[in-house]
Amino acid sequence: MRRPAEITRFALKVLAWFIFWTVVWYEARYLLILPTHLLSGLVATYLLPAWAEAVVQHGTILTLNTSLQVQHIAGAKPGQIALLTPAVNSMLYAYGWPLLMALITASTRRWLIAKMLLATLMLLPFEVTGITFDWVKQVGIEAGALELNPLQANLIAVGYQMFYLIFPALAPVLIWLAMERRFVATLTRLPDTDTSGDNQQKPSNEPLPADCARQNETNT
Amino acid sequence: MIGFFVKFLLLLAALFTLELFKPVQAHLIMPWTDSLATISTAILSPFDGNVASYGNVMVTRTGSFGVSIMPGCNGVEACLILISAIWAFPAPWKAKLWGTLIGIAAIQGLNIVRIISLFYLGQWDQKWFEFAHLYLWQALIMLDVLITWLIWIQYLQRRTRKEEARRTQEPPHAASR
């Protein structure tokens, strides 16, 4: 059967490219994390100006320096203070990037580099949101350093869960679907709403008026 | 497309929030998670006598290694994503129901492969276990969700075209000459 094989072939292509892009991602991880580092620092200091100070990178770990003091440290000398510095492994929020690159390289050849760059940029907000939720969860819920009411605590918990468990893998697929609608329509034989004519549906079995039938013969 | 994305995200948010409720966790999610360990052990037992399970944990009988199946590893989130994608897509409800049931089976099938592979990978090399567990398998499960959904849509399209072809087939009569 020809049609199911198209999706199978696509899946195998994605798998092959996924292995390639996973190796690239792992080898270039310290470089790929730089935009995330920059953006998460800007977002944290803008959204949480009362206590977020700066983001420091150690390998793939992004640490948020805060002005929040840790109370009651066992063994602390008089006058010693400790500041909360929640740390996040950024790779836990970035592992969808190889999948996104694999989907793009398996689905089109036109404007490939531009699409890859655009897709990488579109993935950034999801990574940064997840990392920010992780920091706030560590500071507000685990360390109890923020005065949160139950609703705020629940919203942070749900937000953290969604951006930790779901969006790192889902966002790449959503971005790819948005970018490659025409390809997906062709792959699944969905009616294409695009009027450019590249992916027109096959003609139906209804009989056509004579002049239209001649025109269709020319086109196909 | 925007309509589909909006419906999909709303459904996903609703299902995910529902999943976090304690009664749902206690009566549905945790029992399912425990059963994953049991099922995986049952599949391995004929080939490997050194595997056992209790609760949501799979261990070697020698006690040298074990994996605990936690939220994020039970395939529930992946199933919620697929369910949301199917039910947000315009289709007859029967097709959505069948797609949901077969889709859940497809995802959980691959999830069991994940659990078993991680169980042996962890015994072989901890670094590779961490990499596969935290990064590799998460993306592969999502790929499974995507491919399952695309196959379902393709099946829908084929069925719709067959029905349309059946409807447009008319016996030849004198008026058409």
Image (cartoon, helix red, strand yellow):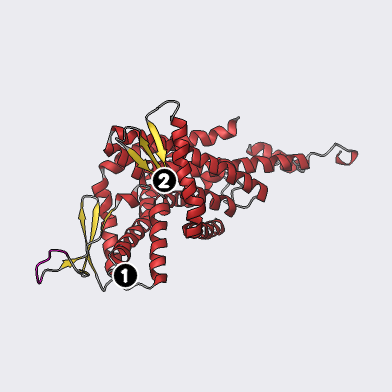
Residue drawn 45% across and 36% down?
B40
- Host chain of mark 2: B
Quadrant containing the N terminus of chain B is bottom right
Q: Is residue A72 above or below residue A104?
A: below
Can residue B20 be seen in this snapshot?
A: yes
Q: Which residue is mark 2?
A: B73
| Residue A164 as seen in the image, left or right of residue B86 | left
User: Majority secondary structure of the magenta segment?
Assistant: loop
Give residue A206's position: percent from left, percent from top: 75, 42
Q: Are marks 1 and 2 on the same chain?
A: no
Residue drawn 51% across and 56% down?
B24
User: Within 10 angstroms of label 2, few (less than 14), some, or many (20 or more) residues?
Assistant: many
Can residue A207 be seen in this snapshot?
A: no
Give the residue type that dot 1 points to. Leu
Q: Is residue A92 a member of the stretch shown in magenta?
A: no
The one of A180 and B89 positioned closer to us in this rendering: B89
Q: Residue B177's image quarter?
A: top right
How many numbered discs sit on the rendered protein? 2
Residue furthest right in the image:
B174
The one of B13 and B63 positioned closer to us in this rendering: B63
Secondary structure under tag 2 reads loop
The one of B126 and A218 positioned closer to us in this rendering: B126
Give the residue type that dot 2 points to. Cys
Residue stretch in magenta: A74-79
Secondary structure under tag 1 reads helix
Give residue B146's position: percent from left, percent from top: 50, 44
Q: Which mark is residue B127?
A: none
Residue drawn 49% across and 48% down?
B31
Disc 1 to disc 2, how far (Cα)?
A: 32 Å
- Host chain of mark 1: A
Q: Which residue is mark 1?
A: A47
| Residue B174 as seen in the image, left or right of residue A217 | right
